[in-house]
Each structure stands twice: as C-alpha cells, then as structure tokens.
Image: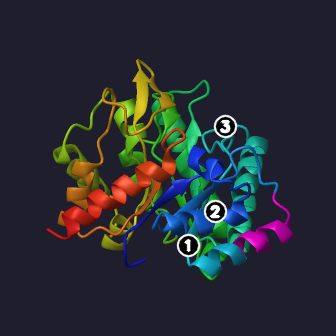
Amino acid sequence: MNRIKIGVSGSDERFYELGYKSTVEMPTYIKGLDLDCFEYSFGKGVRLSYDTRKSIKEAFEKENIEISVHAPYFINFANPDNEKIENTNRYLMDSVIAAKDLGASRVVFHPGSFLKSDAETAFNLTYQNLSKFVELYGDYLIENDIYICPETMGKSSQVGTVEEVAKFSTLHRNILPCIDFGHINARFQGYIKSEIEYQQIVDTLSNYLDDFKVKNMHVHFSKIEYGAKGEIRHLTFSDNVFGPDFEPFAKVIVDNSLTPYIVSESAGTQGQDAVVMKKVYTEYYNK
C-alpha cells in the first residue's frame, strides 16, 4: 500500500461494447485503460464457486491488477435481533473468505440502517456488534492480510457519517475507512464544494486514525443525485448539477501525500470516469 490506485466497480457499458462478457476478462480491459484496480460486488450474496474464484484470481494476477470486494448490501450491524446479527457476521465472513480466494485484500461493507431506532442507538449497536465481530474474526483478518472497510453512507437513515466510520476503524488494526465522497455529498445536501471540504474530511479521519489508515483509505467516487433524505441515484461525470467534483480532491491527495485505493462508481461510465480521475491526479502530482 504505497501508491495510489484508481479503477472501477463492476462492468461498465464500454466493457460490453468491446465484446467482453465475464469477470476473467476484466483485468485485460482495465489494463487497456491504464487503470490499476477493480471492485467485485457481492451485493446480492456470495455465490461464486471456488473454481470461478480461482480463475478470476489467476486472471488478475496475470495482468497485475488489484481486486477488492464489496460485501452483500443486506449486512446490518445496527439490527437489534441477535439472529440477524449472526447472519450479518456470516455474510461479512463469507465475503472475507471469498476475498481471500480471489486474491483481494479489502472488503467494503455498509455498516447498518436505523430500522426503527434513532441515530445514536443505531450507531451504538453497530459499534458494539462490529466490536464483537473483530473479537471473533480479527485474527483471521490479520493472518490473511485482509482489511474490512466500513463505508460512509448516502442516506440520513443509515449509519455511516465520516466520524462514525472513523470510530469503527479504530476497533481493529485491519479495519480501513471506506470514504464514499458521493455519499457524503448527497447525505449532506451538496456539502462538498471545494478542496476545503475534502480537507475537512481528511482532518476528521486524522483525529481518530493513524497515518497509515488515513493515507491508505478506500475510496468510492461518483457524482450522485440527492433529495431531502439523501442519495437518490448515481450519475456520470457529465452531470453539472450535483457533484462532487474530483479535481479538488486530487489536489488534497497530493497535498497530504495520500495513497488511496479509488473506485469509480459512475452509472455506466466507470472506466471513462476513472481514466479522467487518473489524468487529473497525475497532472496535479507532476506540477
């Protein structure tokens, strides 16, 4: 973890237009774009066979493209039901094991949703249940060099402000923050307007976390449409209404000597927008 990486989440429209069909072809596509990484989503459940995982791992290793994993969307550490928490633990561990098989070292997950509780109660439940998770499985994470990454969330009914994610990331050495700048911007109604706000986010992380965790944060980036309750839908870089813009973040990356793992989550143009991000970052870095 000593250099910035920029890549894509999922298969974009261009991937299929070029005739590619399966994940084993993704590293060839990413290398052709001069990008560095890919995030595989288990959003609806971990269903890949071991043989498929092995094939994907070999394909990514051949092209020297890094891979990360997104755990199922139905994980909820804020659930007060013990049986549901056992399910959440299983979903996250299934993702961790799949990550190991794929050769991935990072597993992103959504911390939780309020359900019928208030924000404070939901945060406390999430903190307690995630603490128990790393008590059970922390040694496995260390032994296999896998980091779990709680994500900042885009709706006011979800656990996952920057400060909350920073606090979760203090619970174990193998927890890194996943900072989704589109989510933050949507949740707080267009909060990110310049490098000032990006720097405030980095400073908040630095208030809780050591230099390694801040520098090597996991990042999701896209422009996102929002309403009164936050996130509505992901957009592309062609949008001129909602933001946030990547350029001021590129300056903050360089000014703070950050080396994040950045994943483009644009709606259908992930590859194209990731290429733009890499170009903008490189221009700032070389100034």
Q: Residue furthest left?
A: 287
Circle 2 is placed at which residue position? Answer: 26
For disc 3, the marked residue is 80
Q: Foreground: 246 or 45?
A: 246
- Amino acid tagged 3: Pro
Q: Evaluate whether residue 49 shows in this view.
A: yes
Residue 51 colored magenta? Answer: yes
State the SS at label 3. Answer: loop
Element at badge 2?
helix
Q: CA distance from mark 2 to mark 1?
A: 9 Å
For this rendering, which residue is in front, 37 or 119? Answer: 37
* Depicted 190 relative to depicted 104: above or below: above
Q: Which residue is mark 1?
A: 65
Q: Residue at x 52, y 55 (%)?
A: 8
Mark 3 closeness class: few <14, some 14–19, many ≥20 residues within 10 Å:
some
Mark closest to the chain's N terminus, 2 or 1: 2
